[in-house]
Image (cartoon, helix red, strand yellow):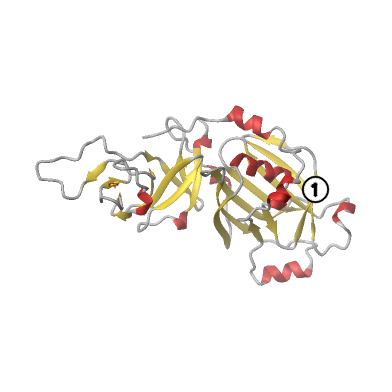
Amino acid sequence: MSSSAWWASALSEAVNGERPLPVVYDGEELVLFRNTKGQALALEDRCPHRRVPLALGCVVGDAVQCGYHGWIFDGTTGACTAIPNLHADERVPPRYAARAYPVAEQNGFVHVWLGDGEPSDSLPAASYQPRGREFTGSAVVSLQHDEYLAVMLDGPECLIDFEGVKITDFFLGDPIRRENHLVLDRGAVWTTQLLPANFVVDYPLILRTSVPLVGGDIRVDLLTAEERLICSVFVASGANRRRTTSLCWRGFMHDHDVEGAPLRWRAMRAARRPPFTVSSEIDGAQIAALLVAPSRDLTVLRQQSRIPATAAV
Ligand code: FES
């Protein structure tokens, strides 16, 4: 079984032992929280009693209590463990169990297993190895998930911005398949560069986007022309309701001198300003104007690689 049925679904710091966190990834409505040992847990965000979202309730010890009639569901098994006002001779009916999902945490992301069978060992965020200060965020954007992935190849400047850097339209080769991802390099220039980007032959910077054929783990790297990493961003994406996309991300600057960087860019770094911004509002007109080129095969490849998301434990 591929590791891609793991979905990075939330930032670790967003999941706590007080309030359940609702998220939607791969169309699955989930509620995330921590038990008394600090372990992250995931249940379907729907009370088995009257289908009220469990996110409206609260965390009680190692369980979630529904906000409507107060039934309590164990975070590990999903079993209903208590019903208020039950008579002494009544038992909790075993059929009232919330769906529980395997959860694993790595590198600042809570992952939920949405595939069949036993979860694999490797997690999507394993490739993200932060060093130093991180910049994080989350959003739900008005773009269908497959389109979001396609735009990340066709026009990443619509979705992410690196301060002081202009992402150009010039690809440095064709998309390359690397394991379960399509990887594309394009030229980038400093915004202080005097020549218009269209006339630059040797790009001082490379923007490398890595888009998954299964799952939702996107990686965006800014590199020097010599392929030294400057800034790395991991974006966990997945289908939300009504053709929108859930996102959460972490990124950091690599710790070395960037040769040739303009003074203004160095000053921004010294002031510890965020080096990148993931767009939470997307310009539809800008997206519509993009040529569909590098992403042409992406939809077909994703369909071929798709894993049924039906797991329940
Ligand atoms: S709807 Fe959840 S306990 Fe009744």
Relative vertical location of residue 7 with respect to residue 192 in this rendering, above or below: above
Residue at 56% over, 46% down = 245
How far across and down, in percent of the image, does residue 244 sit?
Answer: 56, 46
Q: In the image, is 169 to the left or to the right of 148?
A: right
Is residue 20 in sight in this rendering?
Answer: yes
Which residue appears at 66% of the width and 59% of the height?
276
Give the residue at x 16% y 40%: 91
Ligand 1 under 8 Å from disc 1 Cβ = no
Count of all numbered marks drawn on residues in the image: 1
Q: Look at the image and tell me whether residue 39 can be seen.
A: no
- For mark 1, does the 10 Å Cα neighbourhood hold few (<14), some (14 to 19), or many (20 or more) residues? some
Instruction: Give the quarter of the figure containing the C terminus.
Output: top left
Q: Residue 80's spot in the image, x, y percent?
A: 26, 42
Residue topped by disc 1: 169
> x%, y% of residue 201?
88, 50
Choose top left, top right, bottom left or bottom right for residue 305. Answer: top right
Left or right placement of residue 213 versus residue 33 in this view: right
Tell which residue pokes out farthest to the top in this image. 304
272 left or right of 225?
left
Location of residue 196 with respect to 86 vertically, above or below: below
Name the quadrant containing residue 185.
top right
As displayed, is residue 130 above or below residue 98? below
Task: From the viewer's perspective, tell me whether residue 176 is left or right of residue 64.
Answer: right
Toward the left, the furthest residue is 89
Please name the amino acid that badge 1 sits on: Asp
Circle 1 — which element? strand
Q: Which residue is located at x 11 percent, y 45 percent?
A: 87
